[in-house]
Amino acid sequence: MTLKTCLITILLLFGSAANALAEEYDVDATTGYRMERYRAPVPSSIPQGTTITTADAKELLSSAVFIDVLPPVGLGADPFDGNWLISEPRYTIKGSTWLPEVGRGHLTQEHKEFFSRNLKRLTNGDKASKLVFFCTADCWQSWNASKRAAQLGYTNIHWYPAGTDGWQENGNTLSPVLPVNFLDDTTPPLFPPEASVYLLDQSGNETAIGKVLFSTDDGENFGINVKIEGEVFSEQFLSMRPFDCITDPKEWFCYLQYPYPLNNTISSLDLLDLEYQLLFILKSPSDFGIDAWNGLYFKLELAQPQVLVGTALSGDLNVLQSPPAANTRPIDLIEFIDESAARRFPKIIIRP
């Protein structure tokens, strides 16, 4: 068989395989990419790459570049500053980079350049670097992104089709992540340098009560400096001590400063030191004094990138009368209940 005949045979075989894949999985026969309906059953293999399991992904975690390509929920990238306008947080495999919108079948020139330059940045220009592409289970965008990286000349591609679903189902934890800026390729911190603190009433109206300054050294742990203050507070002398209170004919919200040392450090998975600086005591205007039995604790969550939302839980804060053991947090939320529907301020929000 001549060389020419061999090449023709290979091309015919490749074309037959591509057409078979296109017929079975609705892949575009011309481009080789899935062009729509990206959440659907996927093939068992990837051209010019290796399909891996969760066990394989765990082994690669310390040596490969993990790239999450899940498309974000929101309005896309801001054309002026490149920040992604997303409405739902993304939790992914810790240490992964989130490159949205690079797994679609058709990419604009700007998205092609975004993908290409970030692959170059993440691999330091080494096209033999190990790359792991994923999103969720049954996600064609990770398949497309793997294939696209191969076409850009990368030679050590791993495709993890189970994605974050499979990772979590196998007992592994996920961490919040923000997408890479579309224009300057930086990753914003999970918490902003400075955020305002607002109480939200039952109608969603905001009352400003202070600020939080965030600082970080490693991108995961953040120092905090909390200042609860503002014109909305009035100083009240209750039970032989001063309190800053938001007064109302029906219910007073009085700020309770945590009286013991804190590390003043949080992470995306540990917000206790911030929660402990958002304690309140409820008081009826007709009561003579104030009782920490009517305590209020705002349980926080990262509702979306750089935005924390807390739900008011009611419980007894008299436990704070005695100093806790070193490096412990004495409030037991098992004993607190969600009565936010009955509260004047059922929520707290911290945002830029």
Image (cartoon, rainbow, N blue to C red):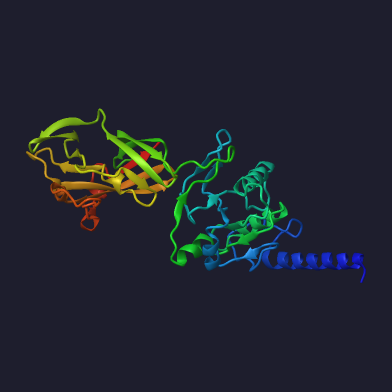
- The vertical placement of 208 against 168, above or below, is above
- In the displayed orientation, state which residue is furthest to the right: 2
Q: Nearer the viewer, residue 326 or 135?
A: 326
Q: Quadrant of the N terminus?
A: bottom right
Is residue 247 in sight in this rendering?
no
Q: Is residue 59 shown left or right of residue 176?
A: right
What is the x, y in percent for residue 29?
75, 60
What is the x, y in percent for residue 269?
38, 52
- In the displayed orientation, state which residue is furthest to the top: 231
- The vertical placement of 119 against 34, above or below, is above
Q: Residue at x 90, y 66 (%)?
A: 3
Q: Residue at x 54, y 50 (%)?
A: 97
- In the displayed orientation, state which residue is furthest to the bottom: 1
Q: Residue at x 23, y 58 (%)?
A: 334
Q: Is residue 25 shown left or right of residue 181?
A: right
Q: Which quadrant would residue 36 be assigned to in this image?
A: bottom right
What is the x, y in percent for residue 39?
58, 60
Is residue 297 in sight in this rendering?
yes
Q: Quadrant of the C terminus?
A: top left
What is the x, y in percent for residue 17?
76, 68
